[in-house]
Amino acid sequence: MRAAVIDLGTNTFHLIIGDLSDKDPQILYKTTVPVLLGQGRINENMIIPEAFERGIRTLKEFKSIIDDHHVDIVRAVATSAVRNAVNGSEFVKAAHAVGIDIQVISGDEEAAFIFNGVRALGIIQRNSLIMDIGGGSTEFIICNEDGLVWKKSYDIGAARLMQAYFHSDPISVAERNAIGDVLDKTLGDLKAACAHYQPELLIGSAGAFESFATLLNNGDDIGDIASMPLDIKAYEDLAVRLLASTHEERTNMKGLISLRVDMIVIAAILTSYILDNIGLNALRLSTYDLKMGVLHSIKDQITSNAG
């Protein structure tokens, strides 16, 4: 049994194809395309024509790859950019016309899939806070070895904050403070939940956290490592460097992909805010995220039906 998962994110579209025959899904193919669906007008909840066309063109390419792999099940999930866009339903219709049926998931469902992906790694062994920084939204999940205890999605993704507040080079103190004010006003219930459940470990789900790991590894690719601890002091030093850097300086940072040259600054502000405001004493990368969570949910469903 082969399954394909398409994750239609605000910045990137991901495709993974897995063989579900074994206990753990075996990844046969994976690719990521920087579609930038949220380009230009994400805070106006609009997919601009150029981004719309890039998205549909990418889905056509994905459909061809899926057909070549003789996939049995296809699951395509769309998150913040499509979920909130006034023309999101038009995008879903256009995708259907090229053979891809999209499920637009809620922020709550998105957080649950992210938890499902991270849990599959087996790294949740104490009270933990999972953080997934997307382009349109950021998800937080409090969990422990017994399961998920609290989750919420917030419309404070890196692309949204960047388009609204990041206009200087390097980012100005005033812009950083403005983002901090937004986070103060937005994340009160997260802070209350963390005060109650007291997570000790911050698990960063893929995306920007993979970039942090690469930069902390002297710009060398971390390869197929599914999870690794990140030294908090080394991360804090990196964040200071990122916030002080110009666009050109970040462009020349070894291992930093072009998509994240500017958004990594916002990601650093978000991550540092969480580390500073919640009593966490450890930081860890999980490369398993929403798409792996969806793949494992398909596997679980097949197993349940067989039983």
Image: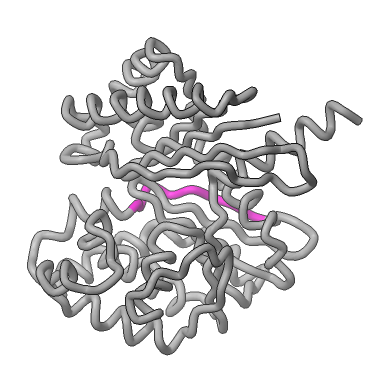
Residue at figure coordinates x 43%, y 65% from the top left:
210
Given residues 147 and 209, the one toward you in this image is 209
Q: Position of residue 121 (x, y in %)?
A: 67, 60
Task: State the image quarter where residue 37 is shown.
Answer: top left
Given residues 113 and 296, the one toward you in this image is 296
Residue 241 falls left or right of residue 103: left
Quarter of the image with the N terminus is top right
Q: Position of residue 189 (x, y in %)?
A: 52, 59
Q: What colouring method underlies this structural image?
A: one colour
Residue at figure coordinates x 75%, y 56% from the top left:
147
* Range covered by the magenta-colored residues: 150-157
How many numbered markers are drawn? 0
Position above or below: 88 against 171: above
Judged from this view, the residue extending furthest toward the front is: 68
Position above or below: 163 against 16: below
Given residues 67 and 295, the one toward you in this image is 67
Q: Position of residue 225 (x, y in %)?
A: 55, 67
Residue at figure coordinates x 10%, y 69% from the top left:
248
Find out whether residue 156 is within the magenta segment: yes
Task: State the image quarter where residue 237 is shown.
Answer: bottom left
The rendered magenta stretch, by its main secondary structure, is classed as strand
Given residues 223 and 136, the one toward you in this image is 223
Residue at figure coordinates x 24%, y 76% from the top left:
242
On the question of residue 111 being in view, the answer is: yes
Quarter of the image with the C terminus is top right
Judged from this view, the residue extending furthest toward the right is: 307
Q: Position of residue 267 (x, y in %)?
A: 33, 64
Position above or below: 133 against 282: above
On the question of residue 192 being in view, the answer is: no
Find out whether residue 5 is within the magenta segment: no
